Image (cartoon, rainbow, N blue to C red):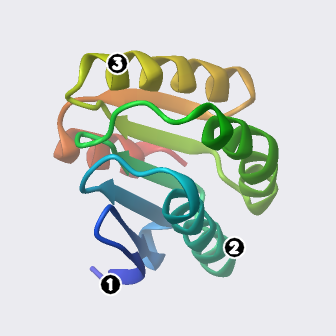
Amino acid sequence: MNKISVYEHERMSVWCYPERKLIHHQMHKPCAGQPFRDALLAGLKAMTEHKATRWLSDDRQHTALAPEDEDWAQDVWFPQARAAGWKHWAVIRPMSAVGNLSSARFRKWYAEHGINARLFTDVDEAHRWLDEQI
């Protein structure tokens, strides 16, 4: 399976699986500000280039987003991602309680805005679910 690295930072990595039409990010530690935004924008660029419709967020090492990053993700990044074809989102729950609550809230918001979103605790299960989504 072809895996392309599209963003690397000590806090977050983003890959693209072109054949699967999948973007995958993994947070290595809490990520905020410009590294967070750069990672999502790199994923968006790959999504557009490879016509990806699925995104896997491995947020186990994350906590909650800062309000300004949350606003940016919803107001700036999301409309572009949706226009690029984003349809399905699997989120691996953060291990922290506050991060877990935040992820549940985000999943709900994105689902209300047309994204088929689901929370997981297992990465393999999330991959399987995404592969079933058309």
Label 2 SS: helix
Alpha carbon of mark 3 to alpha carbon of mark 1: how far? 35 Å
Which badge, 3 or 1, comes first in the chain's sequence?
Answer: 1
In percent of the image, x 55 and y 54: which residue is there? 33
Residue type for callout 2:
Thr
Which residue does the numbered mark 2 point to in the structure image? 48
- The picture places residue 35, in percent across and down from the top left corner, at 49, 64
User: How far from the left and from the top, in percent, is residue 34?
Assistant: 57, 63
Mark seen at residue 50 = none
**Left or right, residue 59 beside residue 125:** right
Report the residue at 40% width, 15% height from top.
101
- Which mark is nearer the camera, 2 or 1? 2
From the image, state whether disc 3 or disc 2 is nearer to you. Answer: 3
Indicate the quadrant where residue 80 lies.
Answer: bottom right
The amino acid marked with disc number 1 is Asn
Q: CA distance from mark 2 to mark 1?
A: 17 Å
Is 129 situated above or below 3?
A: above
Q: Which mark is residue 2?
A: 1
Residue position for label 3:
98
Q: How far is disc 3 from disc 2 in space, using C-alphas?
A: 32 Å
